[in-house]
């Protein structure tokens, strides 16, 4: 990890456009040459990020995802600034638009091709043991020219050496639906998404049926048709 002098950090922020910020300052910058810069701060004094900073996780996960054949951001530099204390990652964005924006712009909901592409992405992630905890429509990029979908904001992720078991697959679907507006936009196509996912997932008959039933119960909750508990 490179060192970034305080005056260089100040110049970076001054010369870039702030894309995202919070009460503690900028979180994402866009430089004049089109590079994105993600700024990480340690939120708690005692945290696992002290040993394994989120910036390093972000860089490591980008490399691992690319090695597995997934489209994601292209890392250019990792540095640390002592004052203010920030880890800094420069990266090229993934071309395309977020799935959330695409869903918002599609009045009739996603078409069959988009459903199959999303299902295929989820199935490949799970088959490779990838649990992407930040999975939601704002972190999935629909790439141009029908090149598929990719991932951004990848710091919060774990990659297991084996395909994900059913409980973790189900948890990841819950991540996908965590925001009510995303869930509402996916509601009408959710059964088709489930079936396309199960077709691509390569599960055995019993885990496939367990997952199908659990996901369809989630669909009934989304649609408000789940019968009351007896």
Image: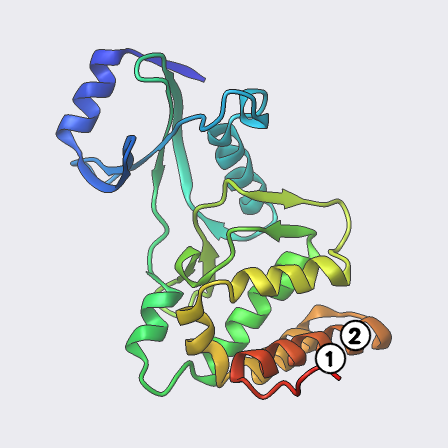
- Residue 213 shows which numbered tag? 1
**Circle 2 residue:** 210
- Residue 61 shows which numbered tag? none
Q: Residue 210, image x and y in percent?
A: 79, 74
Q: State which quadrant residue 181 falls in.
A: bottom left
Q: Residue at x 59, y 64 (%)?
A: 174
Q: Residue at x 45, y 28 (%)?
A: 43
| Vertical position of residue 144 compared to residue 224: above or below | above
Q: Residues within 10 Å of mark 2 (few under 14, many from 20)?
A: few
| Vertical position of residue 170 compared to residue 216: above or below | above
Q: Residue 35, image x and y in percent?
A: 27, 38
Q: Residue 25, image x and y in percent?
A: 26, 31
Q: Residue at x 51, y 83 (%)?
A: 189
Question: Closest to the observer: 160 or 52?
Answer: 52
Determine contact: label 2, label 1, CB under 8 Å: yes
Indicate the quadrant containing the N terminus: top left, top right, bottom left or bottom right: top left
Marks 2/1: CA distance? 5 Å
**In the displayed structure, does residue 194 sit left or right of residue 4?**
right
**In the displayed structure, does residue 35 sit left or right of residue 76?**
left
């Amino acid at each position: 990890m490179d060192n970034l002098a305080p005056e260089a950090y100040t110049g970076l922020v001054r010369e870039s456009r702030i894309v995202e910020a919070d009460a503690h300052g900028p979180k994402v910058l866009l430089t004049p040459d089109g590079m994105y810069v993600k700024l990480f701060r340690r939120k708690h004094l005692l945290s696992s990020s002290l040993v394994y900073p989120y910036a390093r996780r972000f860089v490591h996960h980008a490399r691992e995802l690319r090695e597995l054949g997934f489209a994601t951001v292209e890392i250019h530099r990792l540095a640390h600034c002592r004052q203010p204390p920030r880890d800094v990652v420069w990266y090229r964005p993934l071309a395309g638009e977020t799935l959330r924006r695409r869903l918002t712009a599609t009045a009739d909901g996603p078409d069959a091709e988009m459903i199959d592409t999303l299902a295929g992405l989820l199935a490949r992630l799970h088959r490779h043991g990838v649990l992407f905890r930040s999975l939601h429509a704002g972190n999935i990029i629909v790439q141009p020219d029908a090149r598929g979908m990719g991932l951004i904001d990848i710091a919060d992720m774990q990659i297991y050496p084996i395909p994900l078991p059913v409980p973790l697959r189900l948890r990841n679907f819950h991540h996908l639906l965590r925001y009510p507006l995303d869930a509402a936009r996916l509601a009408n196509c959710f059964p088709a998404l489930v079936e396309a996912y199960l077709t691509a997932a390569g599960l055995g008959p019993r885990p496939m049926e367990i997952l199908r039933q659990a996901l369809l119960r989630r669909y009934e909750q989304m649609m408000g048709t789940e019968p009351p508990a007896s």
